[in-house]
Each structure stands twice: as C-alpha cells, then as structure tokens.
Amino acid sequence: MPPLTAEGRERQAAARVGQSNGPFYTTEDFSYYDRCITRGVTGSILPSLYGDAMRIVQSPTEVAISYEMLHDTRIIPLDGRPPADPGVRQYMGSSIGWFEGDTLVVETTNFTDKLSVGRMAHSEALKLTERFTRIDPDMIDYVVTVEDPRTFERPWTFRLTLTTQPGYEVLEYSCHEGNFFVANALRAEREYQRRVAEARAKGEPIPERTVATGLALEIYQPPSAEDAVDINAGR
C-alpha cells in the first residue's frame, strides 16, 4: 500500500481495529466485525480465518454477491443507472456495474468512514473499482483498485484468484447466536476495574492487562449454566 496522508495517519491512530485492542467499556469499543455487523467490501472478500466462501448470482439486470461470513449481500445493478445520491452512505457503499468484454466492472462509492480497507481506516471519499474476469471454468481473476485521496497518497491495486470448490455449500452465518465475546469482554472489563479499585484502596500495584499474569485467562470465561440460552427454544 502507498503511504498514508496526514489525515489518513490521524484516522488510523484513532481507529479501533477490534478485539486485539482494549479496554472495552461499551459496545462502541468493539469493531463492526466483533459486533457481527459487517467486514466491508474488501474485508469480506479477502481470506480470513474461516467462512471465506461467496456466492455470485447473475440476472440480466443485476449481479448479487453474498458473503458467507457476516451474511452481507451486495446487489449490483447493470442497467446503466447513475450512482446513488452523495447523501446516501452505507457500510458496503453503493455499487453500479457494467461489462467490458468478458470482464464485470463494479464501481462502488458512497461509503461511510466507519470501516477499513487493508486494515487502514478509510474516509467517505473511498472509491473501489473491482474487475471480475473468468479465466477458467473454475477460476475468476479478481482485481480491485482502491482510491481514497483523503487516506492514501495515491491509488493502489491488489488482486487474487477466486476458485470454486465442487459441492461446497455456503452455510448460514449465525454470528449473534452463541457469540458471547462482547458480553464476556465487558464483564471482564468490569472485573478488571474492580480489581484496580481494590488494589488502589489497599495501596497495592495496579494489576496489568496481560495474559502472562493469568488475569485475562481467569476472567475471560464461558458463560455459566445460569447464563446459557437455548437458541432453538420455541422452534
């Protein structure tokens, strides 16, 4: 990636990149990924821990791309309509598409400034130009150019090859069901603050926030049986 602009460096320094950081006082301290909201366009398509599949469906007037992880679906019109009004801002932006020969070109604008591209927090000026070209019955060449003059000193491009896996099924990504990370992190923070107050009252050193002390492993625990919820109840 090219160097960041001065504004880009300020935005990156202030950005929260997710669960590797802390402390967590409210839900606003967690990333949109932690909260099962979205990973953004590039975050959804780049390889991750698991659930990297996508489904691309084409009709005469639009293309729909569904991502397995975090359940986002993008609807890309192909009917020549203009981009959305500048006042419309969305996490995944607003896309329009067209074909140049065998290549599907997708231009996406109208982003918010709440997410990142390549782990770099972008501005509302972000524009993505994606190119999908089938190069084999089971392979698509994917190229995306990133333009954000408020964040990067110049445009930059990355590419990867999308491949099919015979028999693969895109599964439902029930992110909230059984996900106790946010609740556990908030509970752990309250416990840590309690221990800090207790140490101060006794004139003892403030406990550290490190796994090495065993504190993190001790207070980040699965929910008790009393807290458990049967997500299938009532079906």
Image (spheres, helix red, strand yellow):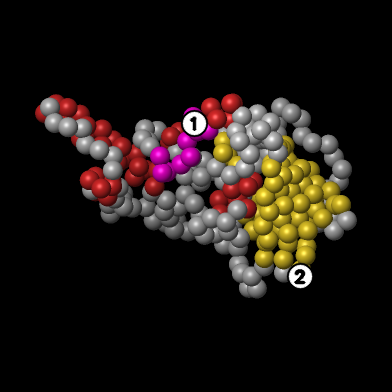
Q: Is residue 115 visible to us here?
A: no
Query: Is 154 on the left-hand or right-hand side of 27?
Result: right
Under mark 2, the amino acid is Pro
Provide residue 70's location: percent of width, then percent of height: 55, 50
Residue at 87% over, 43% down: 80
Secondary structure beneath dot 2 equals loop
Magenta-drawn segment: 12-21
Q: Is residue 38 above or below residue 235?
A: above
Tell me which residue sits at (59%, 26%) in the image.
7
Residue that numbered label 2 is attached to: 137
Label 1 sits on residue: 13
Task: Name the residue at 74% across, 44% down.
Answer: 129
- Residue visible at 21% across and 36% down in the picture: 207
Farthest residue to the front: give it.
3
Mark-to-mark CA distance, 2 and 1: 44 Å
> In the rendered view, would you say 200 is above or below 186?
above
- The correct choice, above or below, for 173 with respect to 187 in the image is below
Label 1 environment density (alpha carbons within 10 Å; few <14, some 14–19, many ≥20): few
